[in-house]
Image (cartoon, rainbow, N blue to C red):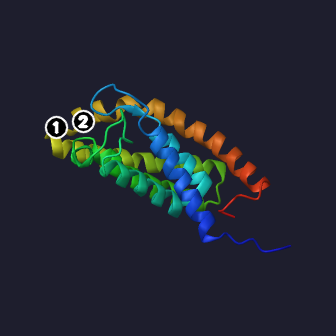
Amino acid sequence: MEEKTVTPVRQLCFIALMAGIMCLLGPLSIPIGPVPISVMTLTIYLSLYVVGMRMGTVSCIIYLLLGFAGIPVFAGYTAGAGKLLGPTGGYLAGYIFLTLVSGFIMEKAAYKRAWCLFGMIVGTAVLYVFGTAWFVISTKSEIGAAVALCVTPFLIGDLAKIILAELVGQEVRKRLRAAHLDILS
């Protein structure tokens, strides 16, 4: 059997594709307070199934840089340095940590279902900690109030996104392998 090689061009194409999907879906949100409900965490989880931790992180950084540069890719079609440095900027920057932590666990566990769920939960917890700490510092809020405002309303929805990502992500990986497009194996 031939050994499969993944060219740097193919990797770059997949990174660009995932960054593009993040930019396309990132603005879609439902404002419920200072932190909107968005599909970004679901998009990040799925990127980890498609391109893995390293390339998923690069895709996420590209997404953040495009938003920083003024392209309206953040929730509610917003953008700019003010958004990244504002009260919810910690959640945006926290996407990098979500990608690194979840992706690391998922890759080390060879994408086994239970470990993927665990990895996404741990990564999301890290996102909550980073984003909420930033929110507390930037708004001078009390931790309890910030958790009630910025974490509690999202727990059930994020758990649903994690379960959906697991179901869809495993199927996407299977189909990419069948089409000889899997760049992770």
Residue 119 visible at all: no
Question: In the shown orientation, is residue 65 left or right of residue 163?
Answer: left
Q: Is residue 136 left or right of residue 111?
A: left
Give amino acid for label 1: Ser
Locate residue 71, reporting x and y percent: 35, 45
Tell me the element at label 1: loop
Which residue is pictured at 29% across the width and 27% down the height? 33
Is 181 in front, or is 124? 181
Q: Which mark is residue 141?
A: 1
Q: Secondary structure at mark 2?
A: helix
- x 51%, y 43%: residue: 43
Q: Name the spot of residue 5 as percent of width and height, x first.
A: 70, 72
Residue closest to the eye, 179 or 172: 179
Q: Residue 146 — which label?
A: 2
- Residue farthest right in this picture: 1
Residue type at numbered disc 2? Ala
